[in-house]
Image: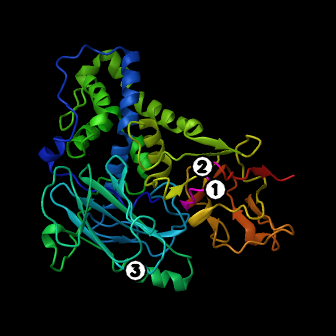
């Protein structure tokens, strides 16, 4: 999941978009809010809007270049990451080292964009498309559409028209679309070369240019964006008025779903209406005082949801509520914060652990073991990996440049066929190094990924496969 080079794009078709939104007219002369009311309503509104604001800030950062450059590219250009991210990567929280990203930020408000991909030669891939609210509204890939060459058009809210023969339509509910493609790669020079050839044949272009040679547009650099900060920090540093002003403008082109109508009414009580300046006067003196606390309280509540976000199993937390969220706003916000770009559960499940089997937070100064019994490796149709992050969900610098162990790792087995994975800062020695997942000296967080998990026993989805506990070594 990336964080700075692949962001959102698509602020257009205002009138068409708004026809799909719940009624969002400004409340007339709302009574001033008490401090308690403002804090409660403001926190709800903050959590509701967090995905859309984060997507927009991601878009701004990831597209803030004149031409494709590493993990960044202007709107309407394809980013083709040629190797796995390293420990310096800060563009997206919880990046992976299993697939090469092939991504694009598109604005489908004005017109559809056509995406073409080549024959993948049976290689695992998926091309999820996220709307502005981080919902995965469609996901072409090996699991769903096979690996042959494909062409589709992503259409925006309210678009009606005719597509060329052989072009499949995927309709986005918002103008912002993030095409977040992942193509499996072993990470060897030979496989990098094969995947690069595939990436080079992935194209995007406006429908109006279909059948012609399309030259992607150059970008304009916005010097006011602090490119040294993470997207999370840029969002967290916003005042309540800045945050809600951005949210109001974004909702004009990225309408909330009809099911969001009750929340839209609450936003109106705060003077937040799509496409209009925030009416901060609606807060009143006491309300305005409380609203200064909202960004901090809102984010703390989002992160605090981690402990109740899903199934708890042997010190791990995972959920199958990713990719499509409905009105589960706190879940949507948490996944945005710790894993922007998360897939639907049928494509990937992401068990995460903040504490060992004894319930104590992981520390790099200690040594831990995760044992997979014989025949009990994660059950998947695609692949699996175990990735190490620091306490902020970023890769950890280490002597081996190893950020993950996975189904492609050549593990050293125990005499009984089980496999021990060592999670620690210190190298466990030559005889165990193949099974070592290097940790930082301080706090750390391991994340297990199961791509295309099996849905019949043994399966993490139906609970017939249990994740092994991570235990502190004696």
Rendered image quadrant of residue 154: bottom left
Q: Give the extent of the magenta segment.
A: 451-463
Label 1 element class: loop
Q: Give the Cα distance between marks 2 and 1.
A: 7 Å
Q: What's the coloring here?
A: rainbow
Q: Position of residue 356 (x, y in %)?
A: 73, 46
The answer to which of 451 and 78 lies nearer the viewer is: 451
Q: Position of residue 413 (x, y in %)?
A: 80, 70
Measuring 36% from the left and 21% from the top, which residue is drawn there?
A: 38
Near mark 3 (Cα within 10 A), the count class, few <14, some 14-19 or many ≥20, is some
Give the mark nearer the N terminus: 2 vs 3: 3
Foreground mark, 2 or 3, reads: 2
Choose the circle earlier in sequence order: 3 or 1.
Answer: 3
Secondary structure that dominates the magenta span: loop
| Marks 2 & 3, CB-CB < 8 Å contact | no
| Residue for badge 3 | 198
Label 3 sits on a secondary structure element that is: helix
Residue beneath label 2, please? 462
């Amino acid at each position: 999941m990336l964080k700075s080079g692949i962001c959102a794009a698509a602020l257009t078709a205002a009138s068409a978009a708004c026809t799909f939104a719940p009624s969002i007219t400004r409340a007339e002369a709302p009574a001033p809010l008490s401090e308690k009311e403002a804090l409660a309503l403001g926190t709800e509104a903050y959590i509701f809007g967090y995905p859309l604001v984060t997507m927009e800030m991601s878009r701004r950062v990831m597209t803030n270049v004149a031409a494709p450059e590493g993990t960044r590219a202007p709107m309407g250009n394809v980013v083709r990451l040629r190797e796995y991210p390293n420990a310096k990567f800060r563009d997206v929280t919880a990046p992976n080292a299993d697939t090469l990203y092939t991504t694009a930020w598109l604005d489908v408000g004005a017109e559809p964009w056509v995406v073409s991909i080549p024959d993948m030669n049976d290689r695992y891939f998926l091309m999820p498309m996220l709307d502005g609210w981080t919902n995965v509204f469609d996901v072409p890939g090996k699991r769903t559409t096979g690996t042959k060459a494909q062409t589709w058009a992503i259409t925006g809210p309210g678009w009606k028209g005719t597509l060329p023969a052989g072009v499949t339509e995927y309709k986005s509910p918002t103008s912002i679309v993030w095409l977040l493609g992942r193509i499996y790669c072993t990470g060897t020079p030979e496989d990098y070369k094969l995947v690069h050839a595939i990436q080079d044949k992935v194209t995007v272009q406006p429908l109006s240019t279909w059948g012609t040679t399309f030259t992607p547009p150059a970008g304009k650099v916005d010097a006011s964006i602090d490119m040294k900060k993470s997207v999370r920090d840029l969002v967290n540093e916003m005042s309540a008025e800045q945050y809600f002003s951005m949210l109001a403008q974004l909702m004009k082109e990225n309408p909330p779903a009809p099911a969001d109508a009750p929340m839209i009414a609450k936003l109106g009580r705060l003077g937040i209406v799509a496409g209009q300046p925030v009416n901060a006067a609606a807060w009143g003196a006491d309300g305005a005082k409380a609203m200064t606390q909202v960004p901090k309280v809102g984010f703390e509540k989002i992160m605090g949801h981690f402990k109740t976000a899903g199934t708890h199993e042997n010190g791990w937390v995972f959920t199958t509520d990713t990719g499509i969220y409905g009105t589960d706003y706190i879940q949507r916000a948490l996944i945005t914060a710790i894993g922007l770009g998360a897939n639907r559960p049928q494509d990937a499940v992401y068990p995460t652990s903040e504490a060992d089997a004894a319930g104590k937070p992981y520390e790099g100064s200690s040594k831990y073991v995760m044992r997979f019994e014989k025949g009990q490796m994660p059950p998947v149709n695609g692949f699996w990996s175990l990735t190490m992050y620091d306490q902020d969900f970023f890769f950890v610098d280490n002597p081996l440049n190893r950020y993950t162990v996975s189904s492609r790792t050549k593990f050293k087995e125990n005499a009984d066929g089980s496999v021990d994975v060592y999670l620690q800062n210190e190298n466990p020695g030559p005889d165990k190094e193949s099974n070592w997942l290097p940790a930082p000296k301080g706090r750390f967080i391991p994340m297990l990924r199961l791509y295309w998990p099996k849905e019949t026993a043994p399966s993490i989805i139906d609970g017939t496969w249990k994740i092994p506990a991570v235990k502190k070594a004696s």
